[in-house]
């Protein structure tokens, strides 16, 4: 058993666990007892693989970005999650969880969403399966993310505003948890990243591990070797990074680099650089590292990219960081925007601003010339055009 994967008590080193109110215990316990059996069932695997292929469009290409490689003096490959149906990696997880929910006999799906990307991915699979879908979203986010709200509604989801607290993601999460407590029997809660109580972080990482499973095969074909020298990804909660690291984590020769959002700068007070500023604590049901005040109140994070605007990281990332297995770095809004423009102009690919954070770290690295670098291009930039337009006066 890998020391970097979850143990049978639900922990990664000191991180993880299930810190939940007693009233949620039956729901989480049912999941914990059944998820591995369901995931390993041949009929589940078959349907999951089929949908990833025919509905999502997998395998996503591993693209050798030649002009980007020339610029930085390394052999850089992009794992093209931006080409997935709905435009990002999140659909890998929601497909997995909707199939699980069906097998648990659940008829109703709930989810939380910040910018709406996870809400859209959830509404999509609910439409696909004809299941009732309720998405909790902060009132402020609903106003900021009108196109995603429209997408969810078009697919038949009910979008419920969270009107308490800061009226953003963490309040939407609290509303979703409250709903789950009140509807324990018929409802499954689809969490959108490698966060939440055990078994969610492990379950979501398994669904996203397809990213590195495909990468291994594709690297072998393209370079003659199945491992890269460096695997990189951006980190909000950490699901695309967890998927990219999953099959390389025990190969200590592979450097794992996770890029957080520094916002206006790590010391600016407007940031989401969790490992720089965070301390150990409990957030959304698991022990991890999170940004908090001295008396334990969660600090509102900030990043220009809504998907990285999260005050914590999943427990596996906290462990990879603390154990030194992973390198956790950050990129500012400005650095990410420039990196997004550079990729667009060198390769004709407009990345999601989240993914641009991973690209931005290339500027700070030194290469000998022949290193193989794999970067998870977690999503496409269509959703971010407004932001790019404002930033570059287009
Ligand atoms: C949501 C999102 C992220 C951040 O989520 P992780 O769980 O950290 O992967 C990154 N990129 C894109 C395109 C997203 O939509």
Image (tube, rainbow, N blue to C red):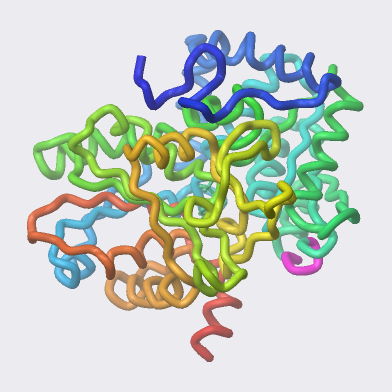
Q: Can you name the residue that lies furthest to the bottom here?
A: 393
Q: Identify the residue at horizontal 37%, vertical 35% (top origin).
A: 323
Closest to the observer, 358 or 69: 358
Closest to the observer, 248 or 226: 248
- Evaluate whether residue 58 shows in this view: no
Place of residue 115 in the rendered image (x, y in percent of width and height, measured from the top left): 67, 58
Q: Can you name the residue that lies furthest to the front here?
A: 294
Assign the N terminus to one quadrant of the image: top left
Q: Identify the residue at horizontal 71%, vertical 47% (top origin).
A: 296
259 horizontally vs 287: left or right: left
Residue 357 is drawn in which quadrant? bottom left
Place of residue 52 in the rendered image (x, y in percent of width and height, measured from the top left): 48, 34
316 horizontally vs 76: left or right: right
Residue 141 is drawn in which quadrant? bottom right
Place of residue 385 in the rendered image (x, y in percent of width and height, measured from the top left): 55, 74
Image: magenta residue range:
142-146
Closest to the observer, 223 or 168: 168
């Amino acid at each position: 058993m890998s020391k970097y994967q979850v143990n049978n008590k639900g922990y990664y080193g000191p991180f993880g666990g299930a810190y939940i109110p007693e009233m949620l215990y039956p729901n989480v316990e049912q999941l914990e007892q059944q998820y591995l059996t369901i995931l390993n069932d041949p009929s589940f695997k078959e349907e999951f693989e089929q949908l990833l292929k025919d509905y999502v469009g997998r395998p996503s290409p591993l693209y050798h970005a030649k002009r980007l490689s020339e610029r930085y003096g390394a052999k850089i490959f992009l794992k093209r999650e931006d080409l997935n149906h709905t435009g990002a990696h999140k659909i890998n997880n929601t497909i997995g969880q909707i199939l699980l929910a069906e097998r648990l006999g659940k008829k109703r799906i709930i989810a939380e969403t910040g910018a709406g990307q996870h809400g859209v991915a959830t509404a999509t699979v609910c439409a696909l399966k004809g299941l009732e879908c309720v998405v909790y979203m902060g009132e402020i986010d609903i106003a900021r993310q009108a196109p995603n709200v429209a997408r969810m509604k078009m697919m038949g989801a009910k979008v419920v505003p969270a009107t308490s607290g800061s009226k953003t993601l963490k309040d939407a999460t609290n509303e979703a948890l409250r709903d789950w407590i009140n509807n324990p029997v018929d409802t499954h809660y689809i969490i959108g990243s490698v966060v939440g109580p055990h078994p969610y972080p492990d379950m979501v990482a398994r669904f996203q591990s397809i990213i590195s499973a495909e990468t291994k095969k594709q690297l072998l074909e393209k370079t003659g070797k199945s491992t890269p020298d460096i695997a990189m990804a951006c980190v909000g909660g950490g699901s695309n990074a967890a998927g990219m690291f999953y099959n390389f984590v025990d190969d200590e020769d592979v450097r794992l680099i996770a890029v957080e959002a520094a916002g206006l700068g790590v010391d600016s007070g407007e940031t989401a650089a969790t490992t720089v500023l965070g301390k150990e604590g409990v957030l959304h049901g698991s022990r991890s590292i999170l940004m908090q005040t001295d008396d334990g109140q969660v600090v509102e994070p900030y990043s220009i990219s809504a998907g990285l605007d999260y005050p914590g990281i999943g427990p596996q990332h906290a462990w990879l960081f603390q154990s030194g297995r992973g390198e956790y770095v950050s990129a500012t809004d400005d650095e990410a925007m420039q990196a997004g423009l550079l990729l667009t102009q060198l390769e004709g690919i407009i990345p999601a601003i989240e993914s641009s954070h991973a690209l931005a770290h290339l500027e700070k690295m030194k290469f000998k010339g022949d290193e193989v670098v794999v970067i998870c291009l977690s999503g496409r930039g269509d959703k971010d055009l407004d932001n790019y337009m404002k930033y570059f006066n287009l």
